Amino acid sequence: MNVPNEFEIIDLKGGLYAVATDIDQKTDKGLMDTEIDQFLSENGFKRDTSRSELGNIITSPLAKKIMGYEQMDYYIPIKAK
């Protein structure tokens, strides 16, 4: 694999992730975490703190222009209780 020098290869441990979407830069992270934890608990899961949370802007430039904001996906590692 030819990886450009400005990129680093990381070993990403696999597993399940819960995904939440919100408006980028306007997320009430505390409220979002509370709602995610409640959802996970009700469905037999809990956070997997051995893995890092991830995030990704999912909005195309055209969608941002139309909506006036960007959306972000938050990936929360989870495992069975």
Image: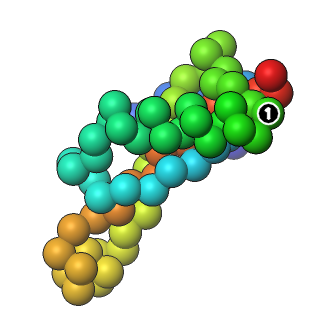
> Which image quadrant for residue 32?
top left
Q: Which residue is drawn at 35% across and 62% down?
A: 71
- Is residue 81 in view? yes
Q: Which residue is drawn at 62% across and 42% down?
A: 39
Please, is residue 37 above or below residue 74 in the view?
A: above
Q: Where is residue 60 in the image (x, y as percent from the top left)?
A: 36, 74
Choose between 14 and 10: the one closer to the eye.
14
Q: How many marks?
A: 1
Q: Which image quarter: residue 42?
A: top right
Task: Give whichever of 79, 55 is nearer the camera.
Answer: 79
Instruction: Check the image and report above or below for 26 versus 33.
Output: below
From the image, tell me which residue sits under label 1: 44
Q: How many residues crowd around disc 1 within 10 Å: few (fewer than 14), some, or many (20 or more)? A: few
> Picture coordinates of residue 31 (x, y %)?
36, 38
Q: Is mark 1 on a helix, strand or loop?
A: loop
**Residue at 56% across, 32% down:** 37
Question: Which residue shows up at 61% across the image and 16% down it?
Answer: 49
For this view, does 1 lie left or right of residue 54? right
Which quadrant of the figure contains the C terminus? top right
Residue 2 visible somewhere in the drawing: no
The percent coordinates of residue 80 (x first, y second) are: 82, 27
Position above or below: 67 against 75: below
Residue 66 position in % (x across, y down): 23, 86
Image quadrant containing the N terminus: top right
- Which amino acid, mark 1? Gly
Nearest the eye: 44 or 26: 44
Judging depth in this view, the residue of 40 and 12 nearest the camera is: 40
Instruction: Name the colour scheme.
Output: rainbow
Which residue ends up furthest to the top in the rendered image? 50
